[in-house]
Image: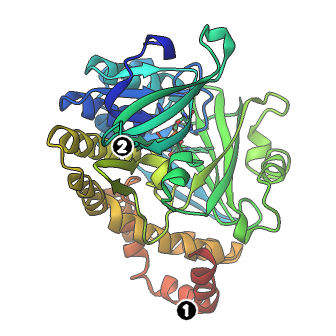
Amino acid sequence: MRDLWGLMREYDIVVVGGGPAGCMAAKYAAKAGASTLIIEEHSAIGEPVQCAGLISKRAIEESELKNTGSFVNCELKGAIVHSQSRELRIEAPSPDKRAFAIRRDIFDKELAKAAMDEGAELILNSKVKHVKKGGEREGAKLTILAAATTASAGVNLEENEIKANVVIGADGWRSGIARMAGLTVTKNFLNCVQIEGQYEIHEPVADIFVGKTIAPGFFAWVIPIGETTARIGLCIDKRFSPHPNPLPFLKRILSEHPVIAKKYKFGTQSKFTAGAIPIPMERQKTVKTENGTGILLVGDAAAQVKPVTGGGVYYGMKCGKIAGEAAARACLERNMELLNGYEKRWQEEIGAEMAFGLKIHRLRCVLSDKDFDRMCQALSKYDMIQRITNRGDMDYPSFVFRELIKNPGIIMLMAKNIIKYLYAERKIR
Ligand SMILES: Cc1cc2nc3c(=O)[nH]c(=O)nc-3n(C[C@H](O)[C@H](O)[C@H](O)COP(=O)(O)OP(=O)(O)OC[C@H]3O[C@@H](n4cnc5c(N)ncnc54)[C@H](O)[C@@H]3O)c2cc1C
């Protein structure tokens, strides 16, 4: 790890942001032989945490991390979906389908270490302020202007210049790189809040609470992270909420919700976090090539998120690998056109799932609390729940909803909501 003074000044690839997407992109770029630098604005990788830390076994495998004991809080054997007056229990049929609550601060650090083990370099406390096209004298290079974010790191606070052929914007939902490159990925976001607190836990399952009055346009969650502690949070889609601030909704469920308020030990709140999750758009442009240079977006910066669950860690790592490989090839073969293969490949991998997820998100936004009850009722029929638990998947949830729309009760419900849904289509686009 170096500070801005100890740096080489030219790299094949600069990755902006040391989250899961950026670390994985850097790992795969370095592994393929490209000189790679990660620039992270915070003083430590993975901090501050803005995540509930719920990921699948498949996502853990995707991370390629072996020392899982260092970051897993606990293994969850299923989920209970609570609507206003119903409960739907979904149990993982085999250990392979289980989910895990993880510590993102440690997980992200391990990912960064794995990238460095492959040869990527990392600087902390440095914020990328600008990416400029190279002038005549620089040849086909981008100039990255980065400034130290803290004086205590012992580096100057002036802007430092680094040159690269490819910049990978892995800088999260607020992506400045997307803005600088003129790549508009999405303008819609879920607003989220979460705390950790003491909670009465009877079994290792995630509780999901749906309903317009609980979390309009999304859901609330309680995720056990120990025997008596849980992460409690929610997201809202502000286009379907009476106000854009999710905090009053959280305060309300903590003090009034018939299940949560009973189990949460009031006043034990710690680790408050607020953040946002991008809602993807149907057409996303995540690559820009110009004069022998290229910019790619990955992870939240590219809105590579599951619209149904808001999870972005698995897709971010998956697309990070594709981005790192494509960027390294483009640099080593001096052919920036190869970068376009990145967009094609990630779309092939997750594009259809994201598009279907977006439709489900639109439907959820217009459902009333009574509709959610009907939905839970329809899903809880024995054969339906069997099919869901056997074939359903938190990384590829479209199967569940494809099953759902074959159910006569759900077809009626959708028919009833069709005008509202079409209106949501317009509003959400
Ligand atoms: C409340 C909440 C709960 C969530 N729960 C889950 C969950 O349970 N499971 C799940 O899979 N997903 C969850 N997510 C989503 C998940 O956190 C993100 O999808 C994931 O972190 C995206 O990874 P990333 O690498 O793209 O971006 P990030 O993890 O956001 O990393 C981006 C990095 O870029 C750095 N950066 C930004 N700008 C600059 C700059 N100019 N210069 C240098 N560095 C910069 C930031 O400091 C940051 O470290 C949740 C999100 C929220 C808000």
Element under disc 1: helix
- Which residue lies most toward the front here? 137
| Residue 168 coordinates in the image, percent (x, y) | 39, 42
Q: Are marks 2 and 1 in contact (CB under 8 Å)?
A: no
- Residue designated by label 1: 415
The mark found on residue 138 in the picture is: none
Element under disc 2: loop
* Residue at x 26%, y 46% (from the top left corner): 322
Tag 1: amino acid: Ala
- In the image: residue 206, left or right of residue 396: right
* Residue at x 40%, y 19% (from the top left corner): 69
Q: Nearer the viewer, mark 2 or mark 1?
A: 2
Tag 2: amino acid: Glu
> What colour scheme was applied to this rendering of the protein?
rainbow
Query: Is the residue 18 above or below the residue 82 in the image?
Result: above
Query: Is the residue 223 above or below the residue 244 in the image?
Result: above
The mark found on residue 136 in the picture is: 2
| Residue 106 coordinates in the image, percent (x, y) | 49, 22
Relative depth, front residue between 259 and 18: 18
User: Quadrant of the image for the N terminus?
Assistant: top left
Residue 391 quadrant:
bottom left
